[in-house]
Image (cartoon, grey):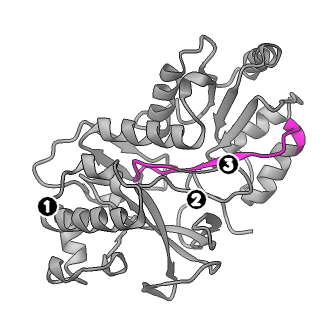
């Protein structure tokens, strides 16, 4: 029997993941009209699907034009992607914000420890100035959980942020600075050196303020200017309620309820072996009431350890905040 959210956050092995993923597929096949319309073109009987590789993945573009939500589920929130005037933003209709909160809080603890151990500084200009950002929602909750008096959002006042950083260096407080790429580069150019008590988490995105650059080049620049050995990254998007993190070297690891697969760009129903570049398919079981099986427009590789490396985006896709162009 499928117990929804209870099953999702109890996964601790591959067999658990497979069982829950297949149950979520059957639930969404029956109850999500948009997903059913797409998936029924590939699968006529939900019971035919015995393996994860047989599950149809919904193209992420559907979130731009359709209400991707299960029938009978009223939404508590609509998360929207950032976009230019020429782009159509994605909309994620979220039925239960408690699932999102449990997902990002559990994911954060898995990779970094308890938020209460940190001062959390969020550098997210552009996101704070609009409504519907899932990233802002996440950071706001993590800031609250940190309970540190200097945790907070820092919009455009980098001088104030630098003063806070100086105080945190003196107090030797463990600190996470989470920010979009261009804002972190702006801070780095202020020539403020950090130390081992600081972790930089970049979320990607130049948003037209700077030239897009490969992630490796971005990290090299940030490491050099901040005098840090590693730069961490977050991989998330409006259409997902879960995040993966790369603590160093751009190798993303996923929490137990999130999984990546690499599809062949020339045959989207086939999957590639380790270290081959293809399109990224995401299984996010946190998306239980929307769609857990999403074919993104990102390109990537998965190594033998199951770690994901971002390689860029399809040439004909929009530049999005969490991704970089091909080098």
For image coordinates 45% across by 63% down, the residue present is 259
* Residue 202 image offset from top left, x and y in percent: 66, 44
Region of the chain picked out in magenta, as a range: 224-243
Q: Which residue is mark 3?
A: 247
* Residue 83 image offset from top left, x and y in percent: 50, 49
Above or below — where is 172 with respect to 185?
above
Q: Which residue is mark 2?
A: 319
Which of marks 1 and 2 precedes in the sequence? 1
Label at residue 31: 1
Q: Nearer the viewer, mark 2 or mark 3?
A: 3
Q: Residue furthest top?
A: 149
At mark 2, the secondary structure is loop
* Residue 242 image offset from top left, x and y in percent: 44, 49
Which of marks 3 and 2 precedes in the sequence? 3
Q: Are marks 2 and 3 in contact (CB under 8 Å)?
A: no
At mark 3, the secondary structure is loop
At mark 1, the secondary structure is helix
Overall secondary structure of the magenta section = loop
């Amino acid at each position: 029997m499928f117990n929804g959210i209870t099953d999702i956050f109890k996964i601790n092995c591959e067999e658990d993941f497979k069982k829950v993923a297949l149950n979520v597929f059957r639930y969404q096949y029956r109850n999500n009209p948009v997903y059913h319309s797409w998936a029924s073109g590939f699968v006529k009987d939900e019971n035919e699907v015995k393996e994860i590789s047989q599950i149809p993945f919904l193209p992420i573009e559907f979130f731009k034009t359709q209400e991707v939500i299960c029938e009978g589920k009223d939404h508590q929130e609509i998360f929207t992607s950032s976009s230019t005037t020429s782009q159509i933003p994605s909309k994620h209709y979220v039925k239960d914000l408690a699932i999102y909160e449990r997902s990002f809080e559990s994911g954060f603890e898995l990779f970094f420890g308890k938020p209460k151990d940190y001062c959390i500084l969020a550098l997210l200009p552009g996101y704070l100035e609009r409504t519907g950002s899932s990233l802002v929602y996440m950071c706001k909750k993590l800031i609250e959980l940190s309970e540190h008096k200097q945790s907070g959002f820092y919009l455009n006042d980098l001088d104030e942020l630098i003063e806070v950083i100086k105080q945190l260096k003196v107090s030797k407080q463990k600190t996470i600075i989470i920010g979009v790429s261009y804002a972190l580069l702006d801070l780095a150019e202020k020539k403020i050196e950090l130390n081992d008590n600081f972790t930089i988490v970049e979320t990607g995105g130049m948003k037209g303020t700077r030239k897009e650059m490969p992630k490796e080049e971005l990290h090299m620049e940030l490491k050099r200017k901040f005098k840090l050995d590693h730069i961490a990254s977050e991989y998330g998007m409006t259409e997902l309620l879960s995040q993966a993190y790369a603590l160093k070297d751009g190798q993303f690891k996923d929490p137990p309820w999130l999984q990546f697969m690499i599809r062949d760009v020339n045959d989207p129903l086939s999957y590639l072996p380790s270290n081959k570049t293809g399109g990224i398919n995401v299984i996010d079981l946190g998306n239980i009431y929307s769609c857990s099986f999403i074919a993104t427009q990102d390109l990537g590789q998965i190594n033998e350890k199951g770690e994901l490396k971002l390689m860029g985006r399809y040439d004909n896709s929009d530049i999005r905040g969490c991704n970089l162009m091909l080098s």
